[in-house]
Image (spheres, rainbow, N blue to C red):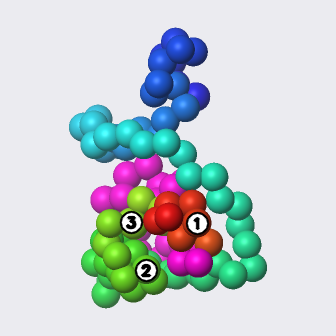
């Protein structure tokens, strides 16, 4: 929860900021998904170039769904994912009902 008044529409939003310089990227409503047996694990490699959009393409065939992976793995800055990080990727079928529909 943020320091905004309870009546603010941003009070329960997810904020994206650069942890180094505080640049603001935007907000969105939180995705409410829990861990599931159908989730896949992905270890970030140098081949991924630390680009979460490329990881989203690999699993969802849609780079615009990078934020699903970021939210599910509690990543506040998608530009700072260290090599070797293990990401939990929710299945496309699960997010389809929450995000795409």
Which residue is labeled 2 in the image?
Answer: 60
Residue in the picture at 51% in, 56% down: 71
Residues rendered magenta in the picture: 70-93
Left or right of residue 41: residue 44: left
For marks 3 and 2 on the same chain, the one whose residue lies earlier in the sequence:
2
Q: Is residue 94 above or below residue 74?
A: below
Residue 19 in percent (x, y) is at 35, 42
Which residue is labeled 1 in the image?
Answer: 97
Q: Few, some or many C-alpha atoms within 10 Å of disc 3 (few <14, some 14-19, many ≥20)?
A: some
For marks 2 and 1 on the same chain, the one whose residue lies earlier in the sequence:
2
Q: CA distance from mark 3 to mark 1?
A: 17 Å
Asked whether 87 falls inside the magenta stretch, the response is yes
Q: CA distance from mark 2 to mark 1?
A: 14 Å
Q: Few, some or many C-alpha atoms within 10 Å of disc 1 (few <14, some 14-19, many ≥20)?
A: few
Asked if residue 71 shows in the view, the reply is: yes
Q: Quadrant of residue 59?
A: bottom left
> Could you tell me which secondary element the residue under label 3 belongs to?
helix
């Amino acid at each position: 929860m943020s320091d905004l008044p309870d009546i603010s529409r941003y009070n329960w939003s997810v904020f994206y900021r650069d942890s180094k310089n505080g640049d603001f990227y935007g907000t969105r409503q939180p995705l409410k998904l829990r861990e599931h047996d159908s989730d896949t694990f992905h270890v970030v490699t140098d081949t991924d170039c630390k680009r979460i959009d490329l990881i989203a393409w690999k699993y969802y065939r849609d780079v615009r769904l990078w934020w699903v992976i970021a939210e599910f793995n509690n990543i506040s800055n998608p530009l700072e994912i260290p090599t070797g990080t293990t990401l939990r990727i929710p299945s496309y079928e699960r997010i389809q009902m929450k995000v795409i529909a």
